[in-house]
Amino acid sequence: MNKKIREKSINNVMKLNKALEKSLNGVDKEIIIRLDKSIPLINDIGKHLINASGKRLRPLLTLAMAAQFNDYSKNPKILAAAVEFIHTATLLHDDVVDESNLRRGQKTANMIWGNEFSVLAGDFLFAQSFELMVETRSIEALSSLATASCKITQGEFQQMQISNKPETSIEKYFEVIGKKTAELFGASCESGVIVANGNVKQQKAAYTYGFNLGLAFQIVDDLMDFNSKSNKMGKNLGDDFKLGKTTLPIILAWEKSNSSERKFWIKTIKELKQEPSDFSKALTILNKYFIFDECKNKAQEFIEIAKEALFELPNTKFKEYFVGLADESIERSK
């Protein structure tokens, strides 16, 4: 990858964070206030995961979309805090379902406090997010994020239904990640424009940008399970493979595999009868059919749709940052 492109992309993300530093600090204060009002254990669990949440990309999108309309008021901050609570709740529930023990290099909440407390803490954060949304007095913003929350749960159910099924269609896979991942990206962007009084076209454009960014983001996450650099993100190499998760690389490999290779996928993904050397064999098959390139190309298609949607939004410095953010999401896999 061209070094100048990498530096420009990362620089755009840093500029976005710097431009919204005061707003992000306001979001942190809202989060702390809400958690401090809860019982001590929920406070501990919530802060543990939020402190390990990385870039806080989704609330950042909410703030940036509102900032395009010069809205730095309390409402975008409240919505951004709600978005972070929704996302954190889904992570708590995900880690219980997946029996994960590591997230971003730290022990997961369920490993520290147990599944029961993690699930209940996630439920509390979901409830708290709706309380925050109501405070904005925007029915439209509430509707956007509430719809996304419902679809996230639907996506979680559907992901479990396609698990251990490498024969899953690409269309079904995109339906699942659209609900599970992309919907919250889309709603995070859309709600920011809504509270900043952007028009309907601008709201839809913001949603389209976020939704397609989310699709690309999830594809790259799928790729990182097979990438030796994944551990820098706190993700164990091969975790998805070991769980038999049906991700885009697996689906594409199944479609192209010969009968012998399909028997391998049946053994390792459907039946979860894995040997230590199987992950290496999986990589060999994926490389044989250039699956990684195909996944990256598909992610790039979604990124181009996302960037095209930005034409409807105001010509501010934030539009440039959104482009940089989109490009940087692809670079995570390189």
Image (cartoon, grey):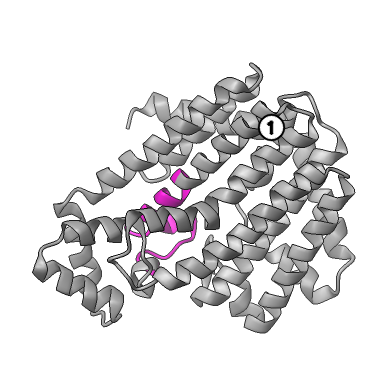
Q: Is 232 colored magenta in this rendering?
A: yes
Task: Provide the residue span drawn in magenta.
Answer: 216-239
Residue 226 higher or lower than 137, as above or below = below
How far across and how far down the image is residue 204, in percent? 62, 33
Residue 274 higher or lower than 295, as above or below = below
Q: Quadrant of the C terminus?
A: top left
Q: Is residue 288 left or right of residue 85?
A: left
In the picture of the structure, the residue carrying the numbered disc 1 is: 65
How far across and how far down the image is residue 269, in percent? 29, 73
How far across and how far down the image is residue 170, in percent? 33, 54
How far across and how far down the image is residue 201, in percent? 65, 27
Residue extending farthest top: 315
Residue 321 higher or lower than 94, as above or below = above
Q: In front: 107, or 250? A: 250
Residue 52 higher or lower than 196, as above or below = below
Q: Is residue 134 left or right of residue 328?
A: right
Q: Is residue 256 left or right of residue 139?
A: left
Q: Is 39 colored magenta in this rendering?
A: no
